[in-house]
Amino acid sequence: MIDLKEYGYDGPLEPVSGLLPGRVTEQHRDRYKAVCLRGEVWAAPTGSFFYSAGQQQDFPCVGDFVLLQYNETGDSRITGLLPRRSQFSRSDFGGHKAEYAKGVQQQVVAANFDYVFILSSLNRDLRLSRLERYLSAALSSGGQPVVLLTKADLCFEVQPVLEEVRLALPGAPVYALSSRTGAGMEELERYLLPGKTAVFLGMSGVGKSSLLNALAGQEVMKVQGIREDDSRGRHTTTHRQLFRLPGGALVIDTPGMRELGLWDADEGIGSAFSDVEALFPLCRFPDCHHQSEPGCAVLAALESGELSRARWEQYLAQKRENAFTAEKSEYLQEKRAWQRSLSKQIRQMKKGPKF
């Protein structure tokens, strides 16, 4: 017997119409491992669920809460997907380069988490621009981002790097830690509480598996070293999986991502670059393009050094990418059309009825 509330579930535990709530802990193509009141089970979507799911994001992923037809002798069946309170998504171009893709879909990496742990190791492969992209995506997910700079024991000057990252990422707390020595690990205690879920995100070799092993107090994931020539990592995690730590916290481990395509990230970009967007209302003209207009606050900030050229260019790059994804995505086009229609209805309601 498993208490699903220990896995972050806050709904009714009693079966409804013979269906049990469960949480997906592993995903292997179209087959899933889940926990429910009866224990750990393997499960697959029913035929009706499979064919009614309109797009990729409609299928379960690790962290999802689902409804199960329990089967004692074989695979249980997934009949429904419960609403997600948070989800981390990236764009999927179907294996094509962006310029050749005819369309783009949403790939949900993990769901129903409280925190997004963005990991990057303190070595030559640390990139501020990459961390800024992860932060924008995390701020759009519904979870609280936390940046973890790992392998602090291999870095001779941790504090200057730590301050540089904190300055570049004002939208998230940033910590340096070492899974090997335990330095900085106490900072995670405020997040890893019973029933709370954190998702690990980052490239291969940044120490996700090592950190998970340290938190679990045993080797639950194999660990491989990084390449010495460029400090890049080798893939250790091959599939997404949810772990329950001894203290009751939950962690979703994900394979390393070489690329992170932004998905519907306007809100996250605005939050990650709030210092940049705070300059826009200070421009002389409300429709300023921030290129050559007189009285442009952005150009003035760039000239004075208040805003770095690299940060401005990263903001523009993320906005362009997000707009391109929206243009290529039928789902986002429909979402925007619905939002415009809703806004129009609200404006008409405020004006009152016409006689």
Image: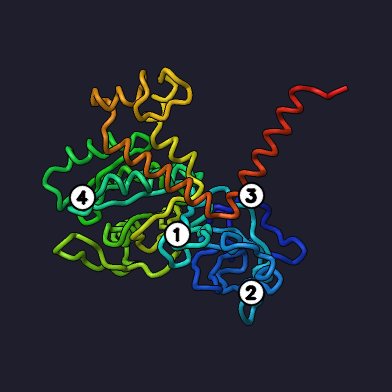
Up-down relation of residue 171 to residue 84 (above or below): above
At label 4, which amino acid type do we have? Leu
* Residue 227 position (above or below residue 171): below
Mark 1 → mark 4, Cα distance in angstroms: 27 Å
Q: Nearer the viewer, residue 294 or 11?
A: 294
Instruction: Give the residue drawn at x 69%, y 39%.
Output: 341
Percent coordinates x, y for residue 95 in the rendering: 44, 67
Q: Are marks 2 and 1 in contact (CB under 8 Å)?
A: no
Q: Give whichever of 29, 284 is nearer the camera.
A: 284
Whole-angstrom CA distance, mark 2 to mark 3, is 34 Å
Q: Nearer the viewer, mark 1 or mark 3?
A: 3
**Is residue 144 visible from the viewing direction of this image?**
yes
Q: Give the Cα distance between marks 2 and 4.
A: 44 Å
Is 213 on the left-hand or right-hand side of 226? right
Q: Pinpoint residue 202: horizontal percent, then vertical percent.
A: 34, 55
Q: Secondary structure at mark 4?
A: loop
User: On the image, numbered disc 4 is attached to which residue?
Assistant: 122
On the image, the x and y values in percent for residue 299 come to 31, 26
Q: Position of residue 176 (x, y in %)?
A: 25, 44
Furthest toward the right, the residue is: 355
Label 2 to label 1: alpha-carbon separation? 22 Å
Mark 2 or mark 4, earlier in chain: 2
Q: Can the viewer see residue 195?
A: no
Lower position in the chain sequence, tag 4 or tag 3? 4
Is residue 80 rendered to the left or right of residue 191?
A: right
Q: Amino acid at mark 3?
A: Glu
The mark found on residue 244 in the picture is: 1
Q: Secondary structure at mark 2?
A: strand
Q: Is residue 190 above or below residue 5?
A: above
Q: Amino acid at mark 1?
A: Arg
